[in-house]
Structure formats: structure tokens, C-alpha cells
Image: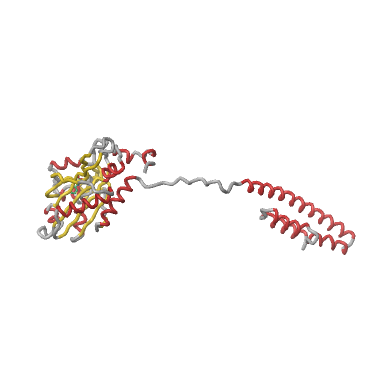
Amino acid sequence: MDLVKIKAQAKKEISVINNSRDLERWRVKFLGRKSALSLFFANLKNLSLIERREQGAKANKLREFLEELYRDNKERIAQQEKEIESWDISRPGTKAPTSHLHPLTLTLREITQVFSRLGFAIVEGPEIESEYYNFDALRIPPSHPARDMWDTLWLKSVSKKGRLLLRTHTSPVQIRYMEKHQPPFRIIVPGRCFRHEATDVSHDIQFHQVEGLMVDEEVSLANFKDIIETAIRGLFSQKVKIRFRPSYFPFVSPGVEVDIKIRNKKSGAQEWMEIMGAGMVHPDLFETVGYNKNLWQGFAFGVGVERIAMIKYNIPDIRLFFSSDIRFLKQF
Ligand code: PHE
């Protein structure tokens, strides 16, 4: 081997060495008695005097180079090994921060899971809705005083189905779904809704509902009561008292509001909390979507998701959900 090759090889090999045992092997290989360099020195005696001088000088330079290389790396490795010895391998690692789901997402998932188990399919509809689906098809004409119940955020554009708006409830999806499907079916529709109103602890301009709709040949309010009782028991993992109060929504007949009895966590007193509007689907809706209104019956309901989350987690102010306050979010 010539000197240039020896040098290249030695440099290459030492560059990947990271412990003293390997370094010692390297030393033996490149500077030891049987090394290529020693052999080179031994062969010098066969050369002429001039050549011997020249090659001998070169070989000496290489030896000095290799010795220095060895010393430098010995120091480097000694340093490294000292550090490794001082590592405390029993010390606990640092935890990477993890995120988690928003309380509303958790609640929405729970609600949809409970209804899935009861055979309801999950359906979605658009947040930008037309006047027709949000109001007219649900028997809420422009002049109807019930439109006041849904103070509306209107958009500037107009569609074939009337002016556009941000949906004020998930009920328009009832019509959208029935236009495209034949009964029997049961669906739930989770989604975001918007209302143009002043905010307070129980009102925000955006919130979520889960709409429910079940249509079959024989569906009654009694079926609804049973389904809703089962769902609420699933959600609160206990038997919760519920009551129906007569109410009015133009798209159901009869219409009810559903309250659940819960213990106020502050005062300890039992109180009724309204959690949804509901009722039997108005036959006009069936006619609107082309069903035979004498053949089909159905119930519909709309649950306020924030309401459920507030009861479940004892949250005092609906506006906290969208406040992005990390102190609030960290509690879930
Ligand atoms: N859409 C009604 C609301 O937003 C709730 C509702 C849904 C009532 C379905 C009856 C039937 O208040």
C-alpha cells in the first residue's frame, strides 16, 4: 500500500470511531508493528540511498500525522465516554405536550354515538342555507311571526331557492333529506347554526344542534319519548326524569319542548332544564317533499349541543366554548 492510500484509509476509519476499544484497534492497524506503514519502513532498505531518504522523509511525516490524529481522537473519545458515564438513564423523560378534543366535539360525538346505537344514520347539511329550506318549506312564510324566533344573519347573494342566509337551525336538513330519500328511515343531523342576537350566558351567535328525524308507517310521540329517554340515559349515564311541555313550531304538530330534571350543582336543588324542541312532523312537510301524507308519520327533534355540554360539565357560560381560553379548555 502506498502512503497516500494509507493516509486516506486511516482518516476514513477513524472518523467513525466512537469508543476507545475501536480506537485501540485502529492504532494497532495503522501504527502497530505489523501495520502497512511499518512494512513500508522495513522495505526502505531495498531502495537506493537517494530514494530511501526521500521515501523515508515522507513516511516519517505520515507517522507524525497519524500519531497526532490518534492523540486528537483519543481525547475526543475520552471526553465522550466521560459524558456517557454521567448520564442518568433512570431519570424520567420529558413529556411532550399533547392536545385533546374540544368539549363540544366530545359532546357531539357522544350524542351521535348514542343515536347510532339506536339505529339513526348520521347526515349533514350546508351551513349556508336558502330562505326556502330554512323557512318556507318548514311552513314559516315571510309574514309569519315565527320568523322572529330565528333572528337571521342574511347573506347578500340570492339562490334559486331564495335569499341565502346562515342557517338558524338544523331543521332545513329534514326537507333536504326527505327530498332525496324514501321512508322508512331514522337520521340525526349534527351541525353548526347561527343567530343574529345579543349574547349572554345562554345565547351565542353560533351554536350547535343535533336534529333528529324518524319517519315510518306508525310512529308516535310515545316512540319518541322512549327513544329520547334511552338517549338521555346514555348521555348522562343515569336515569334522568324528562317532561314534555306543549310548544309551537310551525313544522311539527303537535309540538313540544323537552325538559330534563337535573340537580343544580351549586344549590343542590332539582330543576327542570329545557334541552330540545320536538314534535310530530307536520303532514304539510310530507306533501312538500312528495310523500303520501296518509301513509307516513314521523317525529322530529332539535337538541342544543351546548346546552347538553353545559349540563354535563357544569359550564356556566355558553360563550366559553368559543373563547379559546386555554384555562377553560384544559379542564376537559
Ligand atoms: N328547529 C327548532 C329550533 O331551532 C327545534 C325543533 C326541531 C323543533 C325539530 C321541533 C322539531 O328551535
Residue 199 location (% of width, % of height): 26, 36
Residue 46 location (% of width, % of height): 87, 64
Lateral position of residue 203 relative to residue 9, left or right: left
Residue under the point 20% across and 48% down:
134
Residue under the point 87% across and 59% down:
52
Position of 200 relative to 179 (above/below): above
Lateral position of residue 325 relative to residue 250, left or right: right
Along the viewing direction, whichever of 260 and 194 lies nearer the viewer: 260
Q: Determine the residue located farthest toward the left in the rendered image.
A: 294
Q: Quadrant of the C terminus?
A: top left
Along the viewing direction, whichever of 156 and 279 lies nearer the viewer: 279
Q: Determine the residue located farthest toward the right in the rendered image.
A: 49
Q: How is the image coloured?
A: secondary structure
Along the viewing direction, whichever of 164 and 116 lies nearer the viewer: 116
Residue 18 location (% of width, % of height): 66, 53
Q: Quadrant of the N terminus?
A: bottom right
Q: How many marks?
A: 0
Q: Determine the residue located farthest toward the bottom in the rendered image.
A: 46
Looking at the image, can residue 49 be seen?
Answer: yes
Looking at the image, can residue 157 be seen?
Answer: no
Residue 17 placement: quadrant: bottom right
Residue under the point 24% across and 57% down:
118
Residue under the point 32% across and 45% down:
104
Residue 271 placement: quadrant: top left
Along the viewing direction, whichever of 140 and 94 lies nearer the viewer: 94
